[in-house]
Amino acid sequence: LRHQFLESEQDMRDRHDYVDLIDVPDSYNGPRLQFPLTCTDIDLLLEAFKEQQVLHAHYVLEVLFETKKVLKQMPNFTHVQTSPSKELTICGDLHGKLDDLFMIFYKNGLPSESNPYVFNGDFVDRGKYSIEILMILCVSFLVYPNDLHLNRGNHEDFMMNLRYGFTKEILHKYKLHGKKILQILEELYAWLPIGTIVDNEILVIHGGISETTDLNLLHRVERNKMKSVLIPPMETNRDYDTDSKHNNVGVTFNAHGRIKTNGSPIEHLPKHEWEQIIDILWSDPRGKNGCFPNTGRGGGCYFGPDVTSKILNKYQLKMLIRSHECKPEGYEICHDGKVVTIFSASNYYEEGSNRGAYIKLCSGTAPRFFQYQVTKATCFQPLRQRVYTMESSAIKILKERVISRKSDLTRAFQLQDHRRSGKLSLSQWAFCMENILGLNLPWRSLSSNLVNIDKNGNVEYMSSFQNIHIEKPVQEAHSTLVETLYRYRSDLEIIFNAIDTDHSGLISMEEFRAMWKLFSSHYNVLIDDSQVNKLANVMDLNKDGSIDFHEFLKAFYVVHRYEGLMKPDVTNLV
């Protein structure tokens, strides 16, 4: 009780500091919310966002504080009942694509007591309108707390936001109060429920399950201690001072590269509980029986039909509904109908790549699927062309992975090429690709998209890098260093954002070296410091001792040649 009282007092102080001290000027002509919120405020927000108005930071913070307050009262799993007069709509990833949310509401109606929804995580990141989607969902949740349900996804995570765009969006739209918004978001994420159980027979979670998934344990875990899936728990509660890294510019990091706040260590879940949550947020189904590490994502697992049957039977459930993966038709059914993937962001990779979808559930009846595609020009695009668009985007991403390891791959190819012929057998080439990239992919099938193969079936291995290269910001940079910086650019940016506390985008030479030192020790990347220093000095173009780091990272980009030549002839598609 004392702990709850202290928490309540802290919430009141934070609310005063974060909300009450921020005035809304008379000149503000955006939507003005009235608390307690009503359905009128939902309509107000929708109309304002259609006109691309920005909600004032005062209202954003107030909505977030009120949402967190309600979420703290909720269990880890929300239990929902349906009936013929009250069907439940389940939506998958939206990823900041506001037009898809508008389309869902247009086709299916706004949330209400008679029209309940579950939004199954990944509301934010990647798209341009994540804060608008979050505000619509939070306001709707506050108006209908028993009829709009929010599950946590793997992108409801402040570390993921640093990497995939939401942090930048907040700091761009809310230059003055963005940092406060990000701080309260970090707390709000941790209080989101981790799943929904429908009619005591359908489990709705963002990612998936593993052979060790324990729903009884997951009902009990202190979910608010799961601040980020990218910060694993400490084995023991050691003294954080002995576990910290101090750089030479006065910024203190804990063992995971995160700034310590208020001198207090982050509370962690026990390791086995942390792993349970990782599995349900990050895992993916596969057709092969068993449970294997999810090497593609680096977290969670791949689970087969046998694992699905085992876990569903153990807890007397009939179906698992999850999201987390883009599908050409917006949904996919697998594992003998026991697993359904739902994905609600249409045109996710690029225009025409996929439809979005949502599911309607009613007790005693089969799930019904509703599809849509926001861009009118691609509504009637045939499946084969949509699959091609997804595949070509995936090949493009794969080629970027390949070029980022060019030096390592070249060495591996040459070690196999005893005759120095410039050619390898298909199996030798596939072995090198899998070994160096660490990706268990069907390399033989992919070879026709990646390399030249002669009439004898041998691979001209240096063609792995044809028509693509990493643009060097300066010619003095060694190729190995350029590849390393490109490969780890997202991780470097996370560390940079932690150091750049004023979000100016500028760092001193000293900060740059400190950042590199932290990065190289954390990731065990062996690059000569003198090369980094030399590159930093060259990049200090006006010799003022500062580097525009975001421009620096953007300088390392991949150039794809002849992209236009790879597009399919639409008339040949049926």
Image (cartoon, rainbow, N blue to C red):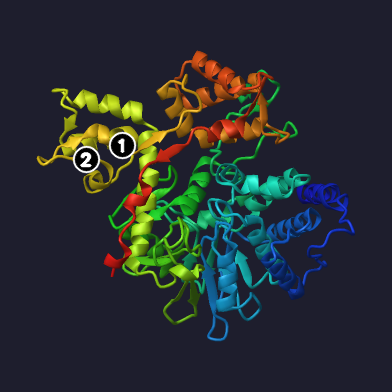
Q: What SS does tag 2 mark?
A: strand
Q: Which mark is residue 466?
A: 1
Indicate left or right for 478 with 50 as reference: left
Q: Which quadrant is home to the C terminus?
A: bottom left
Amino acid at the residue labelled 2: Asn
Question: From what the image shows, is residue 19 above or below residue 203?
Answer: above
Residues at discs 2 and 1 in contact (Cβ within 8 Å): yes
Three-letter code, disc 1: Gln
Specify the label residue 452 is tagged with.
Answer: 2
Residue at 63 percent across and 69 percent down: it is 148
- 127 and 52: which one is in front? 52
Of all residues shown, which one is farthest toward the top? 530
The residue positioned 65% from the left and 22% from the top of the image is 511
Q: Quadrant of residue 89?
A: bottom right
Residue 305: x %, y % from top left: 32, 60
Within 10 Å of disc 2 (Cα), the crowding (few <14, some 14-19, many 20+) is: some
Mark 1 neighbour class, 10 Å CA radius: few under 14, some 14 to 19, many 20 or more: some
How far is disc 2 from disc 1 in space, using C-alphas?
Answer: 9 Å
- The tag earlier along the polypeptide, 2 or 1, is 2
Residue 392 in percent (x, y) is at 35, 52
Does the image show residue 419? yes
Label 1: which secondary element: loop
Image-based side of 296 in relation to 348, left or right: left
**Residue at 48% across / 65% down in the picture?**
203
On the question of residue 316 being in view, the answer is no
Q: Give the quarter of the image for residue 460.
A: top left
Taking 515 as reference, is 431 above or below it?
below
Closer to the camera in the image, 473 or 287:
473
Image coordinates of residue 77 in percent, x first then y, are 57, 62
Q: Foreground residue, 406 or 560?
A: 560
Figure label count = 2
